[in-house]
Image (spheres, helix red, strand yellow):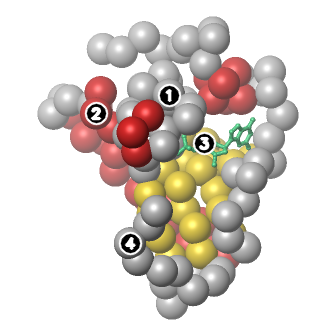
Amino acid sequence: MAQDRDPNCLFCRLEAREIPSDRVYEDDQVIVFRDVNPRAPTHVLAIPRRHVPSIHALTDSPADTALLAALFAALRKMVADAGLEDGYRVVTNVGPAAGQSVPHLHLHLLGGRAMSWPPG
Ligand code: DGP
């Protein structure tokens, strides 16, 4: 299993409240907080409490399968809270070539404006 916490990881530090954030949801596996640099009227990030570098590091284990389900379930709650049922986008950048700047798995939820495709 992956190391539970990386003391040098920004999002592990945010999870531990060493770094403040605007937390909008939490449960035993997942926290959701507002992105510091929002790209849409609603822009939150769902992260696992334990350190996972990206979805690429996940396995087929029951624990990882449950973690993915928990991340999406948390975002679905945010969709309902923000009234985004008409449309929204969920993005996870994996690796530097895709623009991942924080190496701790996070799902972006963006909504509240029209979105174009493809992303840059
Ligand atoms: P990505 O580029 O996919 O790795 O997205 C990382 C996101 O994390 C980016 O949209 C900005 C956000 N972010 C970076 N540092 C912080 C922080 O300290 N607090 C919060 N709330 N968001 C952060």
Ligand 1 shows up in the quarter that is top right
Which label lies toward us, 1 or 3? Answer: 1
The answer to whether one can see residue 83 in this image is no
The residue shown at (29%, 27%) is 57
Q: Earlier in the sequence, mark 2 or mark 1?
A: 2
Quarter of the picture holding the N terminus:
top left
Q: Earlier in the sequence, mark 2 or mark 4?
A: 2
Residue at the disc numbered 3? 31
Residue at the disc numbered 4? 118
Q: Are marks 4 and 3 in contact (CB under 8 Å)?
A: no
Alpha carbons under labels 4 and 3: distance apart: 28 Å
Residue at the disc numbered 2? 56
| Residue 4 % position (x, y) | 47, 15
Label 2 residue near ligand 1, CB within 8 Å: no
Q: Earlier in the sequence, mark 1 or mark 3?
A: 3
Amino acid, disc 4: Pro
Q: In this view, which residue lies farthest toward the right?
A: 20
When the figure is inspected, residue 48 is found, relative to residue 18, above or below; the finding is below
Which label lies toward us, 4 or 3? Answer: 4
Which element carries disc 3, helix, strand or loop? strand
Residue 24 occupies which quadrant of the picture? Answer: bottom right
Alpha carbons under labels 2 and 1: distance apart: 11 Å
Which element carries disc 1, helix, strand or loop? loop
Asked if residue 51 lies left or right of residue 82, the reply is left
Nearer to the camera, 100 or 26: 100
Give residue 21's mark.
Answer: none
Which element carries disc 2, helix, strand or loop? helix
Q: Earlier in the sequence, mark 4 or mark 3?
A: 3
Alpha carbons under labels 2 and 4: distance apart: 22 Å
Residue 68 occupies which quadrant of the picture? Answer: top left
Q: Determine crowd level at label 2: few under 14, some 14-19, many 20+ residues with C-alpha closer than 10 A.
A: few
